[in-house]
C-alpha cells in the first residue's frame, strides 16, 4: 500500500505545453540543425512516423511552445544542464532503455555517484561520431579516473593509450551484471563476454579451456588473482615484479586453502629456491592456466 | 589573464625539457571544412594523414620494442571518411563512417567501419592488429629476451537487420588470430621417466598458431514494453602451435648434464563453446526488470604427442614419448535478475541476484613410454565445480537536491567441489571435497553538492569472508574512497583518495595488503585556442604474505614475502593555437620509488636470499616528453611534425634501460 502511495505521489504532472516541431527550433539554433542529419538521433526525424514527443529536438528537450512564445530562455524548455543526474538518465532512457548494454544503468556505480549520460556524451558537440562521446577514449575516462592513467603509463600495459584497445573493450560504463568470478560482488563495471565469461577471455581465448587440469584459482578467483590488467612492472602484467614470490604466497601449504581445503601445496624439495632457475616458475610450468596432459602444467 | 597565460606557457615550455605514453602521432587536428562537401544527396568528409616515422634507440632496443615498438618508415597514420545522407532516405545507405589508424607498418593499427541504412540495416566492423615483441622468458635471473615478433589480429563484425523495428535480427562474427614466432621451454622432469628427477629446462622456439572464430545469430523482440533478446553463438578455438627441435641443446641448467638432441611436441587442440543467451527486460516509469539466462556448453578435444631424445645426466641415452588424448567438458549456467524500483524521483531501490554454476568433467588417457622399462602411467582427471549465488540490495535516497545517500548490502555464497576422478571406465571416482565460502559486505556513501560547481562524494565498504580460496583472496577487507570535484565553466578540478585494506593477521596462512591511491587532476580550456590538462597520482601498495620453501635441503617455514611499491605519476598536456599554427606539449613521468632503499639488498624483512630481497621492491622511472606542431597551409592541407622521447630506467638492474627518440613528419589533407 505504502509503495503505491509513493508511486502515486511520485508521478509528474502531465505536460500541457504544445509541440511546435523542429523547424521552429531551426530559426534560432541553425548551427545545430544544419549538421543534425549527421547525428544518430536524426533517425527519428527521417522516419517521419514518430509522434512529436519522440522525434527531433522536442524528443529530448520536451515541448517548445512556451520556449518559442518567450523567445528563448533556459527555464522555458528542458535544458540538460539544469537536470539532476537521475532526470537526465530518465530522459535518455525514454528511448535508450531497449538496449541490453544499458539495462543495468540504475544500479551502475556511475549512477550511484551521480554520473549521468551527459557527463560522457555530448549530443551536439561529439568528438566521436558513432557513440557521441564528448572526448575520445581513454581521455574521456581519464577525466575522472586519473589514477588509471598512471596504471596505463607503466612500462608493461594493455595498449590503451596507443589506441589498440579502449576502456570499453573491458568495461561497460552503463552497468553490468554481477561478475562470474571471485565472490560475484566485485569488481564493478567489468564487461562480461557474450558467454558470460571474464572479459579477458574474449581476446585471450587460449586460456578459456576447459582443461583436463584447471589451475583452480584461474577459474575460481579470476585472472586478477595474479594479474594487474591495466599496467605492471612485470612483462606478464603480474602483481609482483617476479613470478616466484607470487606463486609462493599461495603455495605455502598452510591453512585450509586450496582445492581440497588442506592448504595450497608447497613446493617439493627438488625446488631449491636458492638456485635462480627455480625462480622462474613458468619456465617449466608452461601451461600454468590449465593443461590437458599434465597435472603440474608442464606441457 | 595575460599574466596567467604567461605563467602557464612558461610551465608548458619547461615541460618540453622533461614521457607521455600517448603516442604523439597521428595528429588530432582537423582539416577541411567542418561541414564537409555536398554531392548529390550526400555530404562527404574525408581526411588522410600520411608521413614518415623515425626512431633512434640507445640501450636495450628489445625492451623498447617490447614496451612501445614504434619503428621507422612511411605510414598512413590516420584517415577518416564519412558519408551522410542529408535527408535520411539514401538509396543504399544513410551513413558510412570509415576511420583507420596506423596502417602500413605501425605496431598498432585499426580500421573501423559503420554502414547504416535507416530502418533496414546497421553494420559495424572493427579490425585491429597488434605486432608486439614477446618479452620472452627470463631464464638466467636477469634480462629476458625481446626479439620475437608475434602478430595478433582481431576483427568484430555485427549486422543488425531492421534496427528500428519491433523485431530485429542480429548477426555477428568475431575472429582472433595469433601468429608468429614465440618462445617456450620444455621441462623433462619425471621421476619415473628416462630423464632424471633433477631434470633440466630447455628453451625452444615455437611457431604460434592460434585462431578463434565466433559466430552469432539472434533476434530481439520489443512488445508491450518488454524486450526479449535471444542469441545463439558458437565459439570455435584452435591451437596448432608445433614445438620442434633438432640438434644439440645443453639445457638451461649448467649443473645438470642432461642434453636434448631432438624434440617434437604437437598439441593440437580444438574447442567449441556453443552458448545461448536469453534476456528479458522492461523499463517503465517506476520499475525496471532485467533478467538474463545463459548456458554455455564448453567442449575441448585435445591430443598431445611428444617425443624427446637425448641423454640423462649420467650420459646414458634417454628416449621418452608421451601421448595424450581426450576431451574436457565444462557446461556453464548463469542466471541474473536485476530489479530497480523507482517509487519516487527521490528514491530508488535496486536488487540484484545472480547464480553461477560451472562444472568440469571429461575423459583423458595418458600413456608415457619409457623405452627401457616399457612403463606407462595413468592420468587422473580433475573435477571442479563452482556454484555461486549472490544477492545485493541498493537503496538510493535524495532528500534534498544537494544531498544523495546510498547504502548497499551484499551476500555471496560460493560452494566449490573438487575431486580427482579416474578416467577409466569402471573405476570409482573419489568423493568430492566440498567447501563453502560466504561473504557479507556492506557499503555506505553520500554525495553532497554544497555549491552548484562543487561535488563531494565519499564511500566506504566492509566485507567479511569466512573461507577464502587462497591466502591472497580477500578475507576481511575495508575500502574507503572520497572524491572532490569542482567544475566551473571550462575549469575542472578533481581530487581523489582511495584505500583498500585486506588486513588479516600476519602468519604463514594469512596475507595482508594495503593499497592507497591519491590522485588530483585539473583541466582548463579558457579559450578555443588554449587548453591545459594536468594529473598527479600516488599509488601505494604494501603486501605481506607468509611463505615456505626449500633453500637447498633446508625447508624454511614462517618466512615473509614482502612487496612495497610507491608509484608517483604525473602528466601535463597543453594545446595552443595561433591562427594557422597548433602546438601541443606534453610530459608524463612514472616513478616507482619502491620502499626507499638505496640498494637491491635490504635485510629488514623477509628471507635473506638475494632473490627474495630484490623482489621486494622494483624502483624505476619511465618518462616521455612530447611535442607536436601542426601548421595549416591551406584550408585542406596541414603539415605536422612531432617528437617523443621514451626513457626507461630501472634502479637496481640496468640491462633493460633504454632511451628512444621517436618522431614523425606528415601531411594531413582533405579532398
Image: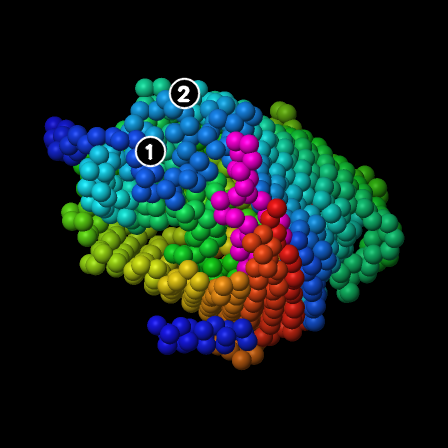
Residue B473, visible in the rendered structure: no
- Is residue A264 rendered to the left or right of residue A10? right
In front here: B583 or B427?
B583
Residue B77 coordinates in the image, percent (x, y): 63, 53
**Badge 1: how crowded within 10 Å, few (<14), some, or many (20+)?**
few
Q: Is residue B366 above or below residue A218?
A: above
SS category of the residue bearing label 1 = helix
Q: Quadrant of the N terminus of chain B?
A: bottom left
Q: Quadrant of residue B477?
A: bottom left
Q: Which residue is mark 2?
A: B166
Distance in Å between CA atoms under marks 2 and 1: 28 Å
In front here: B237 or B457?
B457
- Is residue B393 rendered to the left or right of residue B54? left
In front here: B99 or A139?
B99
Does the segment drawn in magenta span residue B668? no
Indicate the chain on which mark 1 is placed: A
Does the segment drawn in magenta span residue B27? yes
Residue B39, visible in the rendered structure: yes
Q: Are marks 2 and 1 in contact (CB under 8 Å)?
A: no
SS category of the residue bearing label 2 = loop
Q: Residue at x 66, y 51 (%)?
A: B76
Residue A186 coordinates in the image, percent (x, y): 39, 46
Residue B655 coordinates in the image, percent (x, y): 68, 71
Q: Residue at x 41, y 25 (%)?
A: A47
Instruction: Give the main secondary structure of the magenta stretch.
Output: loop
Residue A187 coordinates in the image, percent (x, y): 41, 47
Indicate the chain on which mark 2 is placed: B
Q: Which residue is mark 1?
A: A23
- Is residue B247 rendered to the left or right of residue A131? right
**Badge 2: how crowded within 10 Å, few (<14), some, or many (20+)?**
few
For the record, the magenta segment spans B20-49
- Is residue B593 rendered to the left or right of residue B175? left
Amino acid at each position: 500500500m505504502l509503495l503505491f502511495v509513493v508511486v502515486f505521489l511520485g508521478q509528474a504532472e502531465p505536460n500541457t505545453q504544445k509541440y511546435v516541431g523542429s523547424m521552429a527550433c531551426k530559426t534560432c539554433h541553425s548551427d545545430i540543425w544544419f549538421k543534425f542529419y549527421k547525428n544518430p538521433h536524426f533517425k527519428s526525424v527521417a522516419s517521419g512516423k514518430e509522434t512529436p514527443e519522440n522525434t527531433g529536438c522536442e524528443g529530448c528537450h520536451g515541448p517548445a511552445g512556451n520556449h518559442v512564445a518567450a523567445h528563448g530562455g533556459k527555464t522555458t524548455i528542458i535544458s540538460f544542464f539544469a537536470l539532476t543526474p537521475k532526470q537526465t538518465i530518465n530522459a535518455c532512457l525514454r528511448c535508450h532503455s531497449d538496449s541490453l548494454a544499458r539495462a543495468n544503468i540504475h544500479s551502475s556505480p556511475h549512477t550511484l555517484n551521480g554520473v549521468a549520460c551527459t557527463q560522457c556524451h555530448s549530443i551536439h558537440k561529439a568528438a566521436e561520431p558513432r557513440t557521441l562521446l564528448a572526448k575520445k577514449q581513454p581521455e574521456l575516462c581519464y577525466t575522472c579516473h586519473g589514477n588509471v592513467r598512471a596504471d596505463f603509463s607503466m612500462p608493461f600495459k594493455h595498449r590503451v593509450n596507443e589506441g589498440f584497445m579502449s576502456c570499453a573493450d573491458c568495461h561497460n560504463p552503463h552497468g553490468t551484471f554481477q561478475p562470474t568470478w571471485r565472490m560475484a560482488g566485485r569488481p564493478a563495471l567489468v564487461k562480461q563476454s557474450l558467454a558470460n565469461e571474464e572479459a579477458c577471455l574474449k581476446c585471450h581465448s587460449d586460456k578459456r579451456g576447459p582443461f583436463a587440469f584447471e589451475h583452480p584459482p584461474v577459474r575460481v578467483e579470476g585472472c586478477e588473482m595474479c594479474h594487474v590488467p591495466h599496467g605492471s612492472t612485470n612483462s606478464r602484467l603480474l602483481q609482483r615484479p617476479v613470478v616466484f614470490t607470487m606463486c609462493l604466497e599461495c603455495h605455502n601449504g598452510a591453512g585450509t586453502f586450496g582445492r581440497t581445503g588442506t592448504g595450497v601445496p608447497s613446493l617439493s624439495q627438488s625446488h631449491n629456491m636458492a638456485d635462480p632457475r627455480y625462480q622462474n616458475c613458468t619456465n617449466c610450468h608452461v601451461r600454468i592456466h590449465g593443461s590437458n596432459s599434465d597435472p603440474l602444467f608442464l606441457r | 589573464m595575460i599574466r596567467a597565460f604567461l605563467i602557464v606557457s612558461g610551465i608548458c615550455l619547461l615541460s618540453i625539457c622533461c614521457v607521455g605514453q600517448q603516442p604523439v602521432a597521428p595528429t588530432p587536428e582537423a582539416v577541411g571544412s567542418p561541414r564537409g562537401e555536398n554531392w548529390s544527396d550526400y555530404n562527404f568528409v574525408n581526411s588522410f594523414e600520411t608521413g614518415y616515422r623515425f626512431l633512434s634507440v640507445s640501450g636495450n632496443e628489445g625492451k623498447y620494442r617490447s614496451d612501445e615498438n614504434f619503428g621507422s618508415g612511411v605510414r598512413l597514420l590516420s584517415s577518416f571518411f564519412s558519408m551522410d545522407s542529408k535527408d535520411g532516405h539514401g538509396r543504399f545507405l544513410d551513413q558510412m563512417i570509415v576511420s583507420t589508424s596506423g596502417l602500413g607498418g605501425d605496431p598498432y593499427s585499426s580500421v573501423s567501419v559503420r554502414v547504416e541504412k535507416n530502418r533496414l540495416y546497421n553494420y559495424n566492423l572493427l579490425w585491429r592488429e597488434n605486432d608486439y615483441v614477446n618479452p620472452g622468458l627470463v631464464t638466467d635471473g636477469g634480462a629476458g629476451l625481446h626479439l620475437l615478433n608475434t602478430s595478433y589480429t582481431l576483427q568484430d563484425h555485427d549486422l543488425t537487420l531492421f534496427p528500428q523495428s519491433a523485431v530485429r535480427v542480429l548477426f555477428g562474427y568475431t575472429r582472433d588470430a595469433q601468429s608468429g614466432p614465440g618462445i617456450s621451454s620444455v621441462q623433462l622432469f619425471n621421476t619415473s621417466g628416462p630423464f632424471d628427477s633433477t631434470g633440466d629446462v630447455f628453451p625452444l622456439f615455437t611457431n604460434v598458431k592460434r585462431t578463434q572464430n565466433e559466430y552469432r545469430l539472434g533476434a530481439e523482440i520489443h512488445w508491450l514494453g518488454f524486450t526479449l533478446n535471444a542469441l545463439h553463438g558458437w565459439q570455435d578455438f584452435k591451437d596448432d602451435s608445433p614445438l620442434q627441435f633438432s640438434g644439440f641443446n645443453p639445457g638451461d641448467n649448467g649443473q645438470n648434464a642432461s642434453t636434448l638432441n631432438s624434440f617434437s611436441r604437437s598439441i593440437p587442440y580444438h574447442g567449441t563453446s556453443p552458448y545461448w543467451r536469453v534476456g528479458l527486460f522492461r523499463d517503465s516509469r517506476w520499475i525496471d526488470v532485467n533478467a538474463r539466462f545463459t548456458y554455455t556448453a564448453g567442449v575441448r578435444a585435445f591430443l598431445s604427442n611428444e617425443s624427446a631424445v637425448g641423454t640423462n645426466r649420467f650420459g646414458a641415452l634417454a628416449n621418452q614419448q608421451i601421448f595424450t588424448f581426450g576431451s574436457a567438458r565444462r557446461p556453464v549456467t548463469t542466471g541474473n535478475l536485476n530489479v530497480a524500483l523507482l517509487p519516487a524521483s527521490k528514491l530508488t531501490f535496486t536488487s540484484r541476484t545472480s547464480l553461477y554454476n560451472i562444472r568440469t568433467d571429461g575423459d583423458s588417457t595418458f600413456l608415457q613410454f619409457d623405452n627401457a622399462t616399457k612403463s606407462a602411467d595413468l592420468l587422473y582427471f580433475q573435477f571442479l565445480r563452482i556454484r555461486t549465488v549472490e544477492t545485493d540490495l541498493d537503496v538510493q535516497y535524495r532528500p534534498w537536491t544537494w544531498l544523495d545517500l546510498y547504502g548497499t548490502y551484499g551476500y555471496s555464497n560460493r560452494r566449490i567441489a573438487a575431486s580427482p576422478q579416474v578416467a577409466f571406465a569402471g573405476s570409482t571416482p573419489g568423493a568430492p571435497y566440498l567447501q563453502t565460502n560466504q561473504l557479507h559486505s556492506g557499503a555506505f556513501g553520500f554525495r553532497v553538492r554544497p555549491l552548484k560547481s562543487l561535488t563531494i562524494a565519499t564511500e566506504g565498504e566492509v566485507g567479511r569472508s569466512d573461507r577464502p580460496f587462497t591466502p591472497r583472496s580477500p578475507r576481511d577487507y575495508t575500502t574507503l574512497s572520497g572524491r572532490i570535484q569542482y567544475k566551473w565553466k571550462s575549469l575542472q578540478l578533481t581530487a581523489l583518495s582511495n584505500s583498500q585494506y585486506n588486513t588479516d593477521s600476519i602468519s604463514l596462512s594469512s596475507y595482508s595488503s594495503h593499497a592507497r591511491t591519491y590522485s588530483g587532476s585539473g583541466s582548463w580550456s579558457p579559450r578555443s585556442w588554449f587548453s591545459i590538462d594536468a594529473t598527479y597520482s600516488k599509488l601505494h601498495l604494501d603486501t605481506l604474505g607468509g611463505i615456505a620453501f626449500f633453500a637447498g635441503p633446508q625447508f624454511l617455514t614462517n618466512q615473509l614475502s614482502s612487496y612495497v611499491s610507491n608509484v608517483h605519476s604525473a602528466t601535463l598536456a597543453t594545446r595552443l593555437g595561433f591562427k594557422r599554427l597548433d602546438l601541443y606539449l606534453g610530459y608524463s613521468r612514472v616513478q616507482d620509488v619502491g620502499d626507499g632503499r638505496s640498494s637491491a639488498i635490504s635485510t629488514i624483512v623477509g628471507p635473506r636470499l638475494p632473490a627474495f630481497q630484490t623482489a621486494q621492491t622494483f624502483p624505476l622511472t619511465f618518462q616521455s616528453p612530447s611535442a607536436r606542431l601542426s601548421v595549416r597551409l591551406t584550408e585542406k592541407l596541414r603539415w605536422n611534425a612531432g617528437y617523443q622521447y621514451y626513457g626507461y630506467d630501472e634502479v637496481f638492474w640496468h640491462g633493460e634501460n633504454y632511451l628512444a627518440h621517436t618522431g614523425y613528419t606528415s601531411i594531413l589533407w582533405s579532398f
